[in-house]
Structure formats: structure tokens, C-alpha cells
Amino acid sequence: MTGDSFDYVVVGAGSAGSVVAGRLAEAGNGTVCVIEAGGRDWHPAIHVPAAVVYALGNPRLDWMFRTAPGPGIAGRSILQSRGKVFGGSGAINGHICTRGHRTDFDGWAALGNPGWSYAEVLPYFKRSESRIGSGEDTYRGRSGPFTITDIDAPDPLCEAFMDAAAGNGISRAQDYNGAVQEGIAYVQRSIRNGRRVSPARAFVLPAVRRGAVDLRLNARVTRLHLDGKRVTGVTYLRDGREHTVHARREVILSAGAIGSPHILQLSGIGAPDGLKQAGIDVKHPLPGVGGNLQDHFAARIVLRIKGARTVNERVRGLPLLREVADYVFRRKGALTLTPTLLYCFAKSDPALPRGDIQVSFTPASYPGGVWSGLDRFPGATMACWQQRPESRGHVRALSSDPFASPEVQPNYLVAEADQRAIVAAMRLARSIAASAPFAQYVAKEDWPGAAAASDGDLLDHARQNGNTTYHVMGTCRMGPADDHASVVDHRLQVHGLTGLRVADTSIIPEMPAANTNVPALMIGERAADFSLGREPLPPADV
């Protein structure tokens, strides 16, 4: 066993961990070690935007967790992809950049988390990003490491879909990451010059090249070291050998919404009964570890298209050769597209104070509605979900073996409110598709089809065929010490321990109306400032 020491040890080079490590290195007042279970990010499926469909389910890049059979989804077990590579899930996600609704963060603060209101987190969103495109500077950053761009050129089917949405009372959003989220718009994306912008490459790699970060890849952390109630380091396995790294100041756990609670549990930190059942000695009882799991669950509707070209035809046969050439020589074309092109943030009831449902649209379709190979007919897909699901699940270690996957149980569609919302979202999607001018392009609804007419039929389609959007979060919930479901305080320190913070989407107490990547960057920015003892950035005047 070998052992060495650093001031800061960051576990995980995903989105949040990359920001933490990069900012700590930038400060220059302590040594930084980053330990990442995955390998190098050289696979082309990471960097070519449209190729992300070949990264998901690839065991070289994906942990390929499976959910426990879900009572709300007809007993199915589904793939829950998580990045197993330098960059984590930020290296294999769908490139989409959304922050959430301003009231989401005000809600976090109201739960007993001072410093997390929208006005207080907005400066951290801005600090991380370099926005190329529309948006008021009050809300958008222009000089951060993480580039966010718009689609290169409008798509005719997308334009028709947005015009049809207007006929349903949904206007075009000027900047859904700005003052107003509601509306429909092309997605903002982490793509620049036709290639993925990975948080690891944006924040960590420059520091590694400067010699400011010691990066250890293919190194799987198996447990944290506790000296009484202080975390002093970690043990990891690489090439079959066990190694120990000591942290003079802090360990920052950024292994993700599945990995972080699992590592805590393997270290004896968690609900005592669950740890004992898994054969793990209890070192620090903390019942909230692994609870509060949340995820967006989507039902997809597939349309057969007439009178317009879709991505399905553009990337097959001779047209694919043209697209490859366009990408190689100009970094343009279908291979630069995200798997989803439009986001629609809407209300299931006009009387609601904020949107509660979401519909996405893309001029492409996949067998079974899951990102994979494309259908062989001209197709388009609408995905429908509730923005803030009420169903809650868990991540639970089943064994003391660090290589045994934990139980991941999201409990999709268990809450009745989630069932009503997903049906409302599907109704909205169908209404838009049936409205001019988009309706002229619809040959028929291929899946689930016109026979699925009642609310019960649509809910059954969601139960039988719906899938994750890969937005898991909440399993190390942030909250005050008297909230016994919480794991970390508002400074992301684990309750009852010193020398340990958690910094990733596991700390999110309630789900925002957002994908996870950009909120993870903001969390990483905040965690770095906490670790450095800095005063918070001044709140925005918004």
C-alpha cells in the first residue's frame, strides 16, 4: 500500500468535481489531487455531438447501472447511464444547458439553505460560462471556461413546431436561462466548433497541463478514511493495487448522485439499519444518505414525417458520407446536432404560477424511443415529462463489496401528481403536433399511436415504455442539521463530520426544471469558494 498527501483530494472528475479541482488549482494556495474511476476521454463518441447515442450503454464509457424493478413502471428495470470516463456524465450527456427556474433556487433557500437563492447563485452560473449567443449580460456570463452556444442553423421542422406551439399559447423564449424560462426555443448546448465542451477539459485539463493538479485515472475510490469524526483521506484501487491518499485540508466527494452516496455507505456513513444489512460497520450514522433520489422520467411520442427531411435520412447511406465530409472539413451538419433540438417549458394549467411540464422535440426518431440507432423511416420524437416530480427513491449499498452495484430505485410514477403531469405533457405534445403549420408534416403518430386515446392509455404507455432522462439527483440532500433527511449543510459539509464536503447533483434538495450539467457546474463553483474560505460573490440585482 502506498500513501501520499495533498491539501485537497477531489473524488470524481465529473462536472462538479472538475470545477472544484480547477478553481482550487487556480487559487494556487494548496496542492490538489483528482481521483477518477474512468479512463481517458479519447473516444470519438464523446467529442462528436451526434455520436453521444453510441456513448450511452458503452461499457468503456458508461457505468451502466440498472434501476430496481419499478412499481410505477410495470415492474421494469431500465438502464441508468452514468459517465465512467474523465469528465464523468458531462462527457456523455446530451449537451443541453439549462439552469432551472428562478423559483427553484429560492425554494432551496427556503428549506433552510442560506446563500442558495436565485439572486445568490446567479453569479456562480455566470462565472462558469462563456455564453456565445443571445442573452442579457445581467443573466449571462461571457468569459468563463465553459462555452454555451446556439444551434448553427434553423431547422424547418423545428420552426414549424415552434409556430404550432404559438397556436397553443406558447411563445418563443428569448433566453430560457435568463429572466423568463417559460416558452419554446432551440436548446442551448455545450458545443463549440462542432465538438463537445467537456467540463473536465474546460476546468481540469489546463490545470493538469500546468502541473497544478495531480490527476489519477482508472482509480476507483473504495472508501473514505475516518479518524474519529474527521475524514483524513481515501483508499482507491488501480491496476489491482490498493493506494491511500491523505487530505491535509479536505476531501471533496464529487462522484455523482449514485456514486457519492454509495461511497459514503461503503465508508460506514449512512442509515445504520441499511449499513448493517449490507455487512458494513457503522462509523457515522446519517439516515439521509442515499435517500431523496429524484429523476425526470419521460414518455416519448414518435411521429412519421412526410414532406420534409429528418435526421433519419440524413445520416444513412450516401447522405451520411456527405454529412461526415461536412463535419470533417467544416465542423457543420447533422453530426453537430444534439439528440434534442427544442425545449418547451409549459404549464399544465394556465393558473399555475410557473411551468410544471416540459416537451422536447427533435427531427429524428429512435426504436423504442431510446437514444440508439435511428428508425429507418422519416421520423420525429416528442418527449414529455414533469419538471419537478414528487416521486422519491433511493440509492442503497447491498454489499460491502465496492464493485457490487448499489440498488438504484427511482420509484418513477409512484406519485399520482407525476402521473397526471406526464399525461398532461403528452396531451400538449399531441396538440402541438396536430396544429398548423406543423400538422402538414405528420403522416401519422407511429408510437404509441392513435389507439392510445384516453388518459389511461397514455399513462399505460408511459408506464410500459417511458424512460429516464438521466437527470438523477438529490441523494445527499442539502439542509439544516435538524432536517434528518439531509446529509450536508448549506456549505456542503457532511453533518457531524469535518474534512468532508459533497459537491455534485446529489446535494440538490428539490429538483429544478433543468438538466443536471449546468446546475452541477454552479454547485462546483460554490463548493470551491467554500473550500477556499472565500466570501460569497455579491448577490445579483434581479
Image (cartoon, helix red, strand yellow):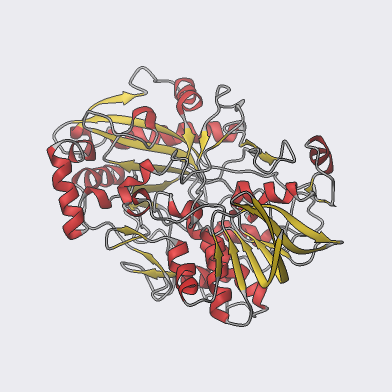
In this picture, residue 39 sits left or right of residue 499:
left
Single out the residue that lies furthest toward the right.
228
Q: Nearer the viewer, residue 235 or 335?
A: 235
Residue 333 in the image, given as x and y percentages of width and height: 20, 51
In this picture, residue 504 sits left or right of residue 110:
left
Residue 354 in the image, given as x and y percentages of width and height: 50, 51
Q: Residue drawn at (61%, 46%), measured in percent from left and top?
A: 258
Q: Residue drawn at (64%, 43%), measured in percent from left and top?
A: 293
In this picture, residue 335 sits left or right of residue 530:
left
Examine the rendering and report whether any part of residue 118 can be seen: no
In this picture, residue 450 sits left or right of residue 15:
left
Task: Please say if 211 is above or below 481.
Answer: below
Q: Residue drawn at (42%, 55%), measured in percent from left and top?
A: 41
Quarter of the picture holding the N terminus: bottom right
Q: Nearer the viewer, residue 438 or 295?
A: 295
Task: Please say if 141 is above or below 176.
Answer: below
Residue 268 in the image, given as x and y percentages of width and height: 79, 49
